[in-house]
Amino acid sequence: MSNHFAAFHDTQQTAEACAQFILSALDGKPKSTLAISGGSSPKIMFEIFAKTKFAWDRVHLFWVDERGVPPEDAQSNFKLANDHWLAPSEFPKANIHRIQAELAPDIAAQRYIEDIRGVFGPGLPQFDVIHQGMGPDGHTASLFPGQPLIQDRTGFAAALWVEKFQQWRITLLPAVLLAAHNTAMLVTGADKTEALDAVLHGPLDPQKYPSQIIAREARDVHWFLEQSLATNAHV
């Protein structure tokens, strides 16, 4: 397990650095795998991807998590990526493995697991890169504080109810998140200072700060942080 930290002046520069890291990690492989998250900072990253000449036909794209909404819904993580990256860059549709969150949650989760197995084959899938973020409460993926699945180390993906938002989510589980060859954590915003400090320096309590499972257990984590956030969180 190792953490690598880099801090940048603002959100734009932070997202740009994360994008370049991901591109470098995927480049040169005959086939690579990437899982992405949603949010405002990734939007900038997706726009960079759309402007970059890259062999996207060699990349199989998955999602870390998805809200229980149809793909055309404004809340959809797929829609965010599609609008700002996939459609503009004409990303090969056969390589897009979205979560079918318009289906019943358990069915959507099972189909996603089958899709993952179809690309990776048997055994635990090991993504080349998994991009994640972190919420002000310390959550990552759709693993929110108090969620029992934070302790799961065997499952690939699952549907879970997020009481805070009164919404179903489908999310990758810790076993898959921790197996990635590279994890790119893109974290911006002053409202995440307290959580980041606790995730990196506080007592181990992933039920309270789920992002600790990445900071304390993942094999190779690259953190891309705004300078003010990094400074105030004592990074």
Image (spheres, rainbow, N blue to C red):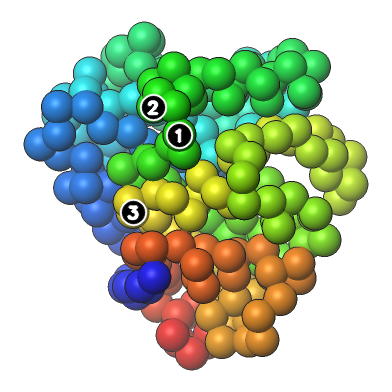
- Residue type, label 2: Phe
Alpha-carbon neighbours of circle 2 within 10 Å: few (<14), some, or many (≥20)? Answer: some
Name the residue that disc number 2 marks. Answer: 120
| Residue 75 seen anywhere in this rendered image of the structure | no
Marks 2 and 3: CB-CB under 8 Å?
A: no
Secondary element under disc 1, as helix, strand or loop, is: loop
From this view, report whether residue 119 is shown above or below residue 177.
above
Marks 1 and 2: CB-CB under 8 Å?
A: yes
Name the residue that disc number 3 marks. Answer: 182
Secondary element under disc 2, as helix, strand or loop, is: helix
Q: Earlier in the sequence, mark 3 or mark 1?
A: 1
- Distance from disc 1 to disc 2, alpha carbons, whole Å, reads 8 Å
- Distance from disc 2 to disc 3, alpha carbons, whole Å, reads 16 Å
Name the residue that disc number 1 marks. Answer: 123
Q: Earlier in the sequence, mark 2 or mark 3?
A: 2
- Residue type, label 1: Gly
Query: Depth check: 210 or 78 in front?
Result: 210
From this view, report whether residue 33 is shown above or below residue 200.
above
